Image: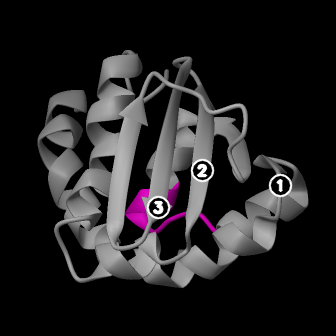
Amino acid sequence: MPFFKDADEVYQYLGGVFVEASKTEVGPKMAAADIDLTIYYTDPESVMTIKMHGDNIEVLTGEENEDADVKLYMTADTGDKYWRGEYNLAVGLAKGQVKAKGPVNKILKLVPLTKPLFPMYREGVAAKDGAAV
């Protein structure tokens, strides 16, 4: 059974981590990547575009960007595991568990920047974890 019950929860938690990142010292570093990233999730079906430019991160939930620099395709559970620090994105890409279109190296450069956000994400889903028991 998927961790997220619907797209709204995906946006709240997986989209929310990008929103929260923009409020930390990590945000401007991620925004400096100067890319648009669209993530397509399954189980439940959902899509979001994260625009990282200048020193700003903008999250557009329910919106795809056909012209995004990088597009990622994965299950929402994979996204959850990544933000918990339990999933290696590079290995997932190599194994085909995560699909990508565009210059993947741009996303892989962001991966080290996201590690300080893992505890914040785990704290954010803690109440949902408790409800899932």
First in sequence, mark 1 or 2: give its number. 2
Residue 17 lies in the magenta stretch: no
* Distance between mark 2 and mark 3 Cα atoms: 8 Å
Q: Give the image quarter of residue 120.
A: bottom left
| CA neighbours of label 2 inside 10 A, class few (<14), some (14 to 19), many (20+) | many
What secondary structure is marked by label 3?
Answer: strand
Which residue carries the number 1 mark? 102
Q: Give the image quarter of residue 3.
A: top left
The answer to the question of whether label 1 and label 2 lie on touching residues, with beta carbons closer than 8 A, is: no
Which residue carries the number 2 mark? 37
What secondary structure is marked by label 1?
Answer: loop
Q: Nearer the viewer, residue 62 or 44?
A: 62
First in sequence, mark 2 or 3: give its number. 2
Q: Which amino acid type is shown beneath numbered disc 3?
A: Met
Left-right relation of 64 to 102 = left
Q: Give, as a single range, the part of the protein colored magenta.
A: 82-88
Q: Which amino acid type is shown beneath numbered disc 1?
A: Gly
How far across and down, in percent of the image, does residue 56 sit?
33, 64
Q: Residue at x 47, y 48 (%)?
A: 50
The answer to the question of whether label 1 and label 3 lie on touching residues, with beta carbons closer than 8 A, is: no
Residue 84 lies in the magenta stretch: yes
* Distance between mark 1 and mark 3 Cα atoms: 15 Å
